[in-house]
């Protein structure tokens, strides 16, 4: 289990898979993920078995507490993980989805990604974390910027959805940027609120 501020990441269990099937039945959610077809329970089970054996893929369930005071039972709200880790260059690509729409825009995605990226740098000893996002997914891009991801490139007309091509952005955060941002945030917290 990896503990964040508002979320926790835990290994995915077989019992979780029906929720993935339900979430990915939503065409809007699939359009953000560039997943064209809904996935069946059987396909999810095959993915689950493959993921268990993979040495360069790590998927986590995201649990959140619905109450903003961070109290009450944990609820499974989504998934995130490293889709691909290159152990030689120490680079990993991440992906994330909050499957339950009522949890969008409440800070859970940013917290889960912050937790995953910290895990990547501090526990997996990665040096670079990347992701790809549709250029029109403003909520996701804003969330990624808050985590510290910077724009590295635009892949023109790399996606196709709703009858139109769209651009895809490549974003990345380096361990040195991350460590600097964390120590600046800690210094700000120690200095207390600004009087300006
Ligand atoms: C992308 C995702 C993980 C982000 O997690 P989240 O919990 O919804 O996002 P957060 O609440 O942490 O942060 C979203 C930020 O975007 C802002 N935002 C939301 N909608 C926005 C919009 N239409 N325009 C601009 N900013 C927007 C929010 O205000 C917030 O920023 P703030 O804290 O500075 O105010 C989640 O929305 C999700 O899973 N969406 C569906 C699947 C998806 O898009 N996955 C990513 C594929 S690359």
Image: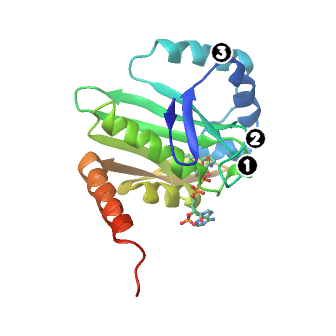
Task: Give the foreground label among 3 and 2.
Answer: 3
Q: Residue at x 29, y 57 (%)?
A: 183
Foreground residue among 63 and 19: 63
Of the image marks 1 and 2, the number of the one nearer the N terminus? 2
Residue 129 located left or right of residue 158: left
Foreground residue among 113 and 70: 70
Asked if 10 appears above or below 7 in the picture, the reply is above
Q: Position of residue 146 (x, y in %)?
A: 45, 59
Residue 151 located left or right of residue 87: right
Task: Give the foreground label among 1 and 2.
Answer: 1
Asked if 89 appears above or below 12 in the picture, the reply is below
Q: Assess mark 3: CB under 8 A from ligand 1?
A: no
User: Callout 1 environment at 10 Å: few (<14), some (14 to 19), or many (20+)?
Assistant: few
The answer to whether the residue labelled 1 contacts the one labelled 2, judged by CB atoms less than 8 Å apart, is yes
Q: Position of residue 98 (x, y in %)?
A: 64, 43
Q: Which residue is mark 1?
A: 101
In the image, farthest residue toward the bottom: 196
Q: Residue at x 69, y 30 (%)?
A: 20
Q: Which residue is mark 3?
A: 45
Of the image marks 3 and 1, the number of the one nearer the N terminus? 3
The answer to whether the residue labelled 3 contacts the one labelled 1, judged by CB atoms less than 8 Å apart, is no
Q: Position of residue 61 (x, y in %)?
A: 59, 31
Q: Which residue is mark 2?
A: 26
Query: CA separation, marks 3 and 1?
Result: 23 Å
Q: Secondary structure at mark 3?
A: helix
């Amino acid at each position: 289990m990896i503990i964040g501020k508002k979320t926790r990441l835990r290994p995915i269990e077989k019992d979780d898979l029906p929720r993935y099937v339900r979430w990915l039945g939503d065409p809007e959610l699939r359009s953000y993920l560039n997943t064209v077809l809904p996935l069946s329970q059987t396909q999810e089970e095959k993915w689950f078995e493959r993921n268990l054996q993979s040495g360069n893929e790590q998927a986590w369930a995201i649990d959140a507490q619905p109450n903003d005071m961070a109290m009450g039972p944990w609820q499974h709200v989504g998934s995130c993980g490293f889709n691909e880790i290159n152990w030689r260059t120490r680079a990993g690509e991440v992906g994330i989805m909050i499957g339950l729409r009522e949890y969008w825009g409440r800070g859970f995605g940013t917290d889960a990604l912050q937790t995953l990226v910290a895990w990547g740098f501090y526990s997996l000893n990665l040096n670079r974390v990347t992701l790809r996002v549709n250029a029109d997914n403003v909520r996701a891009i804003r969330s990624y910027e808050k985590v510290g991801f910077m724009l590295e490139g635009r892949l023109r007309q790399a996606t196709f959805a709703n009858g139109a091509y769209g651009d895809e952005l490549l974003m990345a955060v380096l361990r040195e940027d991350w460590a600097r941002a964390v120590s600046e945030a800690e210094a700000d917290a120690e200095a207390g609120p600004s009087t300006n």
